[in-house]
Image (tube, grey):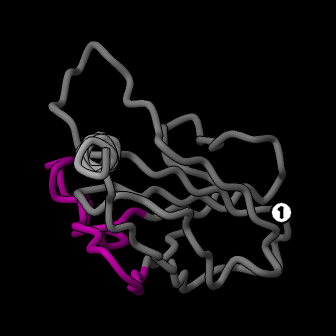
Amino acid sequence: MKIALTLLYSILISSFTFYDYNQTTLNLSNLNFDLGGDVRVQVFKKQPINLMVELEPVEKIQVPLEIASHIKLPALEPGEYMITVFHDSNKNGKMDYSLLGKPKEGYGLSGEFYCGNKNAKPESYYVYLNSGNQQLSINVCY
């Protein structure tokens, strides 16, 4: 009986997958607090790029501007992610663009993204999030 219970317990435990999760804090720099509004963050897990299909975020976060300098992301499995940030200064829930297609609100991306020098390779915006605690800095461009 003891062996059967031990075997059953082992099977039950092995059927669950245990992940190490990470706790990532985004440190946003260059936010323009004078504009008011909210900051919106989207987190995308790396997947093959298909130009015909829009990527779906695994997390969406909306934070009041007053506390947006340091945003804690929900626990995520370790892996590659792209994180997008935009300062929704007019609180309409979407990025606003000029007639020429230039963003009218602040924005930033993880990875190799720099204001005024956009990289044409989307895969360069992915970062690897390890298990445990970590900090990630994103500069907001206006």
Which residue carries the number 1 mark? 37
Instruction: Specify the quadrant of the image occupied by residue 70.
Output: bottom right
Query: What are the residue bounds of the magenta stretch?
Result: 109-137
Residue ID at (24%, 58%): 79
In this rendering, the answer to whether 53 lies above or below 96 is above
Residue 51 placed where, x, y %? Answer: 23, 20
Instruction: Let me know if residue 86 is in the magenta part.
Output: no
Residue ID at (46%, 64%): 108
**Amino acid type, mark 1:** Gly
Mark 1 nearby-residue class (10 Å; few <14, some 14–19, many ≥20):
some
Viewer-nearest residue: 41 or 92: 41
Secondary structure under the numbered disc 1 in the rendered image: loop
Residue 9 placed where, x, y %? Answer: 34, 48
Residue 67 placed where, x, y %? Answer: 77, 81
In this rendering, the answer to whether 135 lies above or below 72 is below
Left or right? Give the position of 18 relative to 7.
right
Q: Can residue 16 be seen in this view?
A: no
Residue 77 placed where, x, y %? Answer: 34, 58
**Which quadrant is home to the C terminus?**
bottom right
Viewer-nearest residue: 17 or 129: 17
| Count of all numbered marks drawn on residues in the image | 1
In this rendering, the answer to whether 142 lies above or below 27 is above
Residue ID at (48%, 38%): 101
Instruction: Specify the quadrant of the image occupied by residue 21.
Output: bottom left
Left or right? Give the position of 61 relative to 140.
right
